[in-house]
Image (cartoon, rainbow, N blue to C red):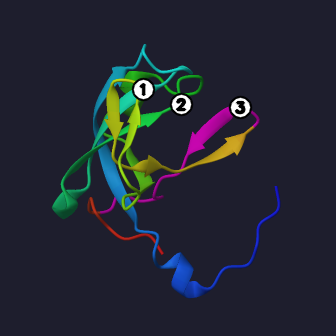
Amino acid sequence: MTSSTIQFDDFVKVDLRVGTIVEVADFPEARNPAYQLIIDFGELGIKKSSAQITTLYKKEDLLNRQIVAVVNFPRKQIASFMSECLILGAVDGKDVILLKPEIKVKNGSTVL
């Protein structure tokens, strides 16, 4: 996949924030193996997301983990679940490796 050049004004439209996963549940209704995540984004509140990260992460390893997510996408219905943000990760083959801050930061912190 090739990427095209964007303007800085396009980039700043994407609201990237740090949040902490506070709940993790199996998502058997999803087409591909996934978890349902509840994420605390501080002043932005709590948001839900579905993530296909079951091959590398156990539920207990995700709890209280900080992640980076796009929080200003429209909500998306995934089976019986309404996803409200998109968690970011690096794709390695079929595996997704979650992005996270190197040092714990305040939930809701902006990522530039």
Q: Which residue position is annotated with label 1?
A: 35
**Which dot marks residue 64?**
none
**Which dot marks residue 53?**
2
**Would you say residue 99 sits in the magenta stretch?**
yes
Measured along the vertical axis of the image, is residue 111 above or below residue 92? Answer: below
Q: Secondary structure at mark 3?
A: loop
Horizontal relation, residue 91 to residue 56: left or right: right
**Real-space Cα distance between discs 2 and 3?**
10 Å
Q: Amino acid at mark 2?
A: Ile
Q: Amino acid at mark 3?
A: Lys
Nearest the camera: 81 or 24?
81
Q: Secondary structure at mark 1?
A: strand
Residue shown at 17% from the left, 63% from the top: 43
Question: Where does the magenta region start and end?
Answer: 93-105
Around disc 3, counting alpha carbons within 10 Å, would you say few (fewer than 14), some (14 to 19), or many (20 or more)? few
Q: Which residue position is annotated with label 3?
A: 94
